[in-house]
Image (spheres, rainbow, N blue to C red):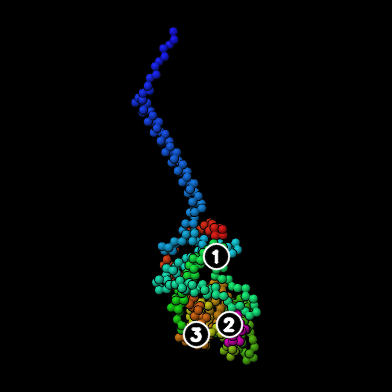
């Protein structure tokens, strides 16, 4: 007898079935969320790696002057502007270091300028550019090949990876520095200073030195101080000949180791104390401004080193408490005054450098691309 087929019954969702389904749905959502988070983390890491290797260094600070920061992108632009693409490879790191120094100095001058009431206008920048690119007068009977025009120069700038904006900014910085230096030089260097008219002989004492001196005998023969390492003995021998009436110029030509004074008969000219200290040393200056006129000084060491073997013997012919400075001497004193002033001002700044050799090499490579 065939079995009786069971009738199809409707599927009923029980509480147990519903609870299991809900748990499964929750786990699916958790797994999807975890997967999305993992994918997001991987993408973030990959993105950061790309940013760190390709973009981050461009925004990395390489120099800070007080509150002003300069990043790698600016540094690379300056390397291109200074023409690193045309510099031999052996000189590229030297140029790169100098460019960093130029950026620092320009910013210091820029921050100091308002306190001095100094500024540069766009018109001054235009005038300087025109002055640099004005066509020169060609010599007669010479084919005029034409000077480099400003438009041609801008094309070269573009080839080097720089822009006209960068160039104008650099012209402005150069003009500002020049204005400040001229102002400080004039302000801190007087036109007149106390000076002394000096003549000198630079003697050298060594194992082979021979210095001739007049004897005290009536015959007026000569004696030699051979191998003397005592500058006082040499000084006494020269003084004896001066006392006997020999000309200082003759003795300077015979004994002086200083070529310039030797050629001028020992004449060192009118010198201020600052120039003496700069050219010679502090002791030289002290002696020159205290020595009795037309008296031969004691030996003045040329340097303070232990192995010094050269000494100055000087005479002062005249002194003047207020004598106009020679133009070349005043220019040297101006330069010294500016250097001293800038060093003093720089010490008041907070300057931080972040450019190590590896970053500098990276910047050079990017600037050359």
Q: Quadrant of residue 9?
A: top left
Magenta highlight: main SS: helix
Apparent side of residue 127 relative to residue 146 in the rendered image (left or right): left
Report the residue that reaches farthest toward the left. 15
Mark toward the viewer: 1 or 2: 1
Circle 1 residues within 10 Å: few <14, some 14–19, many ≥20: some
Is residue 142 visible in the rendered image? The answer is yes
What range is drawn magenta here? 248-266
Circle 2 residues within 10 Å: few <14, some 14–19, many ≥20: many
* Of callouts 3 and 2, the N-terminal one: 3
**Secondary structure under badge 3?**
strand
Mark toward the viewer: 3 or 1: 1
Give above or below for 127 relative to 165. Answer: below
Q: Which disc, if any, is residue 196?
A: 3
Residue 179, how many percent across, how many down?
46, 74
* Residue sitting at x 51%, y 72%: 129
Camera-nearest residue between 265 and 157: 157
**Residue at the disc numbered 2:** 261
Disc 1 and disc 2 in contact, CB within 8 angstroms: no
* Residue sitting at x 58%, y 82%: 261
The N terminus is located in which quarter? top left
**Residue at the disc numbered 1:** 157
């Amino acid at each position: 007898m065939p079995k009786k087929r069971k009738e199809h019954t409707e599927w009923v969702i029980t509480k147990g079935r519903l609870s299991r389904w809900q748990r499964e749905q929750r786990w699916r959502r958790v797994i999807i969320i975890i997967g999305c988070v993992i994918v997001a983390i991987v993408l973030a890491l990959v993105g950061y790696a790309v940013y760190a290797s390709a973009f981050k260094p461009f925004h990395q600070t390489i120099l800070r002057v007080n509150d002003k920061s300069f990043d790698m992108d600016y540094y690379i632009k300056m390397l291109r502007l200074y023409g690193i693409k045309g510099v031999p490879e052996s000189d590229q790191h030297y140029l790169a270091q100098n460019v960093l120094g130029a950026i620092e100095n320009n910013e210091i001058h820029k921050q100091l300028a308002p306190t001095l009431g100094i500024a540069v206008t766009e018109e001054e920048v235009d005038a300087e550019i025109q002055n640099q690119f004005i066509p020169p007068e060609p010599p007669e009977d010479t084919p005029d090949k034409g000077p480099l025009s400003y438009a041609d120069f801008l094309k070269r700038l573009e080839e080097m990876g720089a822009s006209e904006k960068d160039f104008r900014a650099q012209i402005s910085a150069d003009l500002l520095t020049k204005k400040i230096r001229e102002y400080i030089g004039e302000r801190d260097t007087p036109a007149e200073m106390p000076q002394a008219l000096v003549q000198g002989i630079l003697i050298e004492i060594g194992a082979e030195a021979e210095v001739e001196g007049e004897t005290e005998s009536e015959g007026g023969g000569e004696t030699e101080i051979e191998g003397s390492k005592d500058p006082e003995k040499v000084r006494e021998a020269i003084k004896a000949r001066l006392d006997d009436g020999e000309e200082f110029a003759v003795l300077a030509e015979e004994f002086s180791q200083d070529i310039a004074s030797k050629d001028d008969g020992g004449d060192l000219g009118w010198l201020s104390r600052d120039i003496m200290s700069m050219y010679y040393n502090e002791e030289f200056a002290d002696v020159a401004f205290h020595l009795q006129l037309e008296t031969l000084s004691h030996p003045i060491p040329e340097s303070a080193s232990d192995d010094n073997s050269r000494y100055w013997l000087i005479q002062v012919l005249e002194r003047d408490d207020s004598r106009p400075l020679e133009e070349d001497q005043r220019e040297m004193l101006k330069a010294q005054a500016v250097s001293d002033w800038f060093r003093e001002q720089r010490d008041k700044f907070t300057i931080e450098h972040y450019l190590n050799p590896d970053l500098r090499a990276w910047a050079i490579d990017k600037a050359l691309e």
